[in-house]
Image: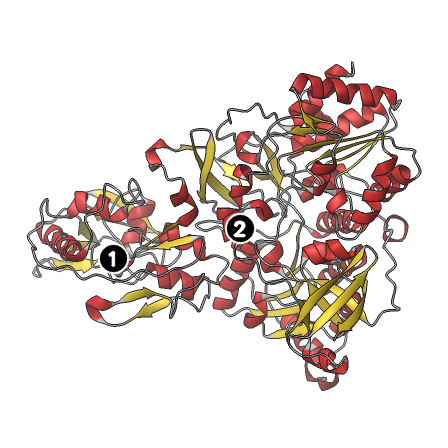
């Protein structure tokens, strides 16, 4: 650590810092365009000119670019020197020669870096009176709007898209003052992090196409610190609302998690809160009613059923809502769980238990520093920002290995990628454990490429094992834990959980409760079912059983902010606040507890789940303490995290889950030749499925089959097949794909639901001639 001077101010710096970085970290502003903390220095804009006094008193001061000049102890730097000011003024004047004068209507207004720098550095008037150079814009899809005439050639867009996010369908074309940033042809950007161009671009070349539809000036937006609800990573966000509606979501920096970026699901998935089908009024027996009447009806049904009651929380519901529902059910003698799929319940609880046993999962910043990883499943679909962190590790030389059943974008960066059927994953993980203990495994060609995976993990100083819980069983979860233990202390373990608060929901749930509740509803032992933010009737594997079982209920009471299959079937429906309309707590995949604030309130009265449960308890004569007190009773050291802070790892008693006694794994039939695999994508999530802009990019609904398996079955690309499952059948076209495992059919979630099968279940295939 050393220091230097900028116009008399002492600036500390770390080894490797350039002058600009050190100045910005010390809150000293040096004008710049092309520099970005995540992307580093390029020196393309020439705006960060500073004057540096020579240590040799006989030499004149020199002008240098602050982003390219390394910090040195004792340097004397001037931002205000006349020579540096003149260079910055000339740069701005040249940039403004071709820039459009559309500031009054520009959707970058209020956050335009070019406007700020022009006011700070540039000439107050334009001398150039000639014709401006112009470009044609491209159609980049439903999420990003392109205005190429605003470009100042800072190269931030391509440095992020190509170098950082490792995308390959956007680049720089042409030469000199005709440089064009775009695609070879019109079409949606394919990278799942493309929306970050909106924030990376300093001048509005790339803007939020969704925000443009209901545009508001940024100074009119109401904002508050929030947490993304679309996966278990817990990225920090800054939603913006105006006139009682949510308009946009942007990144809010967190030094250990998302830092400067978020994925496109997190940026554009918010449209669900403004979807036309969103329930906004309480409903009883299909008719809109008042909140009071809905509570009265629900309380009456619960009393008539003599407290034969069960309830579902949710992995996408906050800790407060889940805990309050559990507290009410405890008073009524009911059963609680946050998971409607028994296999997903046990796998999620097993994963939390495994992390408690082996140590907390690494943060995204930690993941970027690993030098080897074994990935089970499709992280791009289940935790996109973990995918982005692994891409940074890959850029630094990390070796990535994959076991996957369906196509995954990370395969293109993997040193070793093995496509395995869902039922084969446990066998592969067990074999990897065995290979770790075999000497000279790297030279055993009979075990390649499994030996290559073991060699890279054993040779790493900092390795990672990570799996997507939605496509793992509890046995596979524990097999991954065993492998991590076998590899030793240099190996970290992580899981991508199925929801923003799945970790917290698992802490409140007990393995086996989902099965118990399903059987109790089927047998008539439970007559009232309260569902908060869950969709048992729309579940892929158990949805058909839940739909049939619910005919035995006296009342299905649903609390939700989206129109799910379960919400549509509700006898009593309470519409509740979306995540930006309430405050609460999520616990992310690390076990990090983070708070989020209410950003705005709609004109309609939309309480949180916790508030509905509190009011329902009052109508039942069972008063409940407030949510914070309930959580403190459950977790003695629990403290509600303050929104806007980095959060903290939650301390809770260890979950006890003996694998032999607590895991009720579903026995899958092996009579069929084919296994089903979930073919997911980065927009595939319960809330985001109601975001129209994101859903416009949904891949076509097809049956993905590995070419050799297709040939053996007499199929070719484009063939029509009829798939049969327990709940129904569906005709789909075949698409050949090398990323699918042998004997596996990779299909979308909506197809799994229609067929009534889950990941790894058997399928019957019939060719349609």
Q: Is residue 743 left or right of residue 20?
A: right
Q: Nearer the viewer, mark 1 or mark 2?
A: 1
Relative to 255, 654 lies left or right:
right
Q: How is the image coloured?
A: secondary structure
- Image quarter of the C terminus: bottom right
Q: Residues within 10 Å of mark 1 (few under 14, many from 20)?
A: some
Q: Is residue 16 above or below residue 404?
A: above
Percent of width and height locating residue 570: 74, 33
In the depicted view, which residue is nearer to us: 665 or 97?
A: 97
The numbered dot on residue 676 is none
- From mark 1 to mark 2, how far is it between C-alphas? 28 Å
| Secondary structure state at the residue bearing disc 1 | helix
Mark 1 vs 2: CB contact within 8 A: no
Please tell me which residue is depicted at 48% across the width and 57% down the height of the picture. 193
Q: Is residue 637 visible to us here?
A: no
**Front-lying residue, 215 or 411:** 215
Above or below 406: residue 235? above
User: Nearest the camera: 458 or 326?
Assistant: 326
> Can you identify the residue that label 2 sits on?
265
Give the percent coordinates (x, y) of residue 554: 85, 29
Q: Is residue 589 visible?
A: yes
Residue behind mark 1:
149
**Residue at image x 76%, y 70%?**
428
Q: Residues within 10 Å of mark 2 (few under 14, many from 20)?
A: many
Which residue of the protein is positioned furthest toward the front in this rendering? 769
- Rendered location of residue 47, percent (x, y): 20, 55
Instruction: Return the disc, 1 or 2, that comes first in the chain's sequence.
Output: 1
Residue 728: image location, x then y, percent: 80, 57
Q: Secondary structure at mark 2?
A: helix
């Amino acid at each position: 650590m050393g220091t230097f001077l900028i116009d008399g101010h002492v600036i500390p710096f770390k080894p490797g810092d350039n002058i600009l970085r050190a100045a910005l970290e010390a809150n000293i502003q040096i004008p710049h365009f092309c520099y970005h903390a995540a992307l580093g220095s390029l020196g393309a804009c020439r705006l960060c000119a500073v004057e540096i006094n020579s240590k040799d008193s006989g030499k004149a001061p020199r002008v240098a670019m602050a982003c390219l000049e390394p910090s040195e102890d004792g340097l004397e730097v001037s931002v205000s020197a006349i020579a540096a000011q003149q260079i910055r003024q000339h740069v701005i004047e040249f940039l403004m020669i071709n820039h459009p004068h559309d500031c009054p209507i520009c959707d970058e207004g209020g956050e335009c870096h070019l406007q700020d720098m022009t006011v700070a550095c540039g000439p107050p008037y334009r001398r150039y009176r000639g014709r401006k150079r112009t470009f044609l814009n491209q159609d980049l899809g439903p999420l990003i709007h392109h205005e190429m005439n605003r470009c100042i050639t800072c190269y931030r867009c391509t440095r992020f898209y190509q170098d950082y996010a490792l995308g390959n369908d956007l680049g720089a074309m042409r030469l000199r003052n005709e440089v064009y940033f775009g695609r070879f042809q019109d079409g949606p950007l394919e990278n799942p992090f493309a929306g970050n161009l909106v924030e990376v671009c300093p001048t509005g070349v790339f803007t939020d196409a969704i925000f443009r539809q209901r545009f508001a000036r940024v100074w009119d937006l109401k904002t508050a610190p929030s947490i993304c609800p679309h996966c278990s990573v817990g990225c920090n966000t800054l939603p913006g609302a105006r006139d009682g509606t949510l308009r946009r979501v942007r990144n809010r920096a967190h030094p250990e998690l998302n830092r400067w970026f978020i994925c496109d699901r997190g940026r554009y998935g918010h449209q669900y809160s403004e979807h036309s089908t969103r329930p906004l009024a309480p409903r009883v027996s299909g008719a809109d009613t008042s909140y009071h009447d809905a509570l009265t009806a629900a309380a009456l049904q619960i009393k008539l059923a003599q407290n034969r009651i069960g309830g579902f929380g949710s992995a996408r519901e906050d800790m407060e809502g889940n805990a309050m529902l559990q507290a009410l059910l405890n008073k009524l003698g009911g059963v609680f769980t946050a998971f409607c799929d028994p296999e997903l319940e046990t796998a999620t609880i097993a994963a939390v238990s495994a992390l408690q046993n082996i140590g907390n999962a690494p943060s995204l910043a930690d993941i970027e520093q690993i030098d080897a990883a074994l990935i089970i499943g499709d992280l791009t679909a289940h935790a996109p920002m973990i995918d982005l962190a692994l891409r940074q590790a890959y850029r630094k030389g990390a070796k990535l290995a994959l076991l996957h059943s369906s196509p995954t974008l990370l395969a293109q960066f993997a040193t070793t990628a093995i496509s395995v059927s869902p039922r084969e994953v446990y066998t592969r993980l067990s074999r990897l454990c065995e290979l770790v203990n075999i000497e000279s495994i790297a030279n055993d060609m009979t075990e390649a490429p499994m030996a290559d995976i073991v060699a890279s993990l054993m040779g790493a100083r900092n390795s990672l094992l990570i799996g997507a819980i939605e496509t793992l069983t509890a046995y596979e979860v524990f097999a991954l834990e065993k492998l991590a233990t076998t590899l030793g202390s240099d190996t970290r373990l992580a899981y991508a959980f199925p929801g923003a608060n799945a970790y917290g929901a698992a802490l409140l749930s007990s393995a086996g409760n989902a099965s118990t509740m399903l059987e109790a509803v089927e047998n008539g032992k439970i007559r009232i079912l309260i569902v908060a933010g869950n969709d048992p009737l729309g579940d892929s594997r158990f949805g058909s059983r839940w739909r049939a079982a619910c005919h035995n209920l006296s009342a299905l009471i649903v609390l939700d902010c989206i129109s799910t299959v379960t919400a549509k079937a509700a006898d009593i429906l309470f519409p509740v606040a979306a995540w930006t309309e309430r405050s609460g707590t999520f616990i992310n995949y690390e076990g990090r507890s983070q708070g989020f604030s209410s950003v705005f309130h709609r004109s309609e009265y939309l309480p949180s789940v916790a508030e509905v449960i509190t009011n329902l308890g009052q109508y039942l004569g069972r008063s409940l303490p407030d949510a914070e007190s309930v959580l403190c009773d459950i977790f003695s050291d629990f403290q509600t995290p303050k929104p806007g802070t980095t959060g903290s790892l939650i301390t809770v008693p260890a979950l006890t889950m003996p694998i032999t006694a607590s895991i009720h794994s579903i026995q899958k039939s092996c009579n069929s030749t084919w296994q089903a695999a979930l073919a997911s994508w980065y927009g595939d999530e319960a809330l985001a499925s109601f975001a129209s802009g994101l859903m416009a990019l949904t891949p076509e609904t097809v049956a993905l089959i590995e070419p050799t398996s297709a040939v053996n079955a007499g199929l070719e690309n484009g063939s029509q097949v009829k798939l049969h499952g327990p709940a129904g059948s569906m005709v789909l076209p075949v698409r050949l794909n090398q990323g699918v495992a042998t004997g596996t059919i990779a299909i979308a979630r909506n197809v799994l639901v229609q067929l009534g099968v889950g990941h790894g279940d058997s399928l019957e295939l019939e060719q349609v001639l």
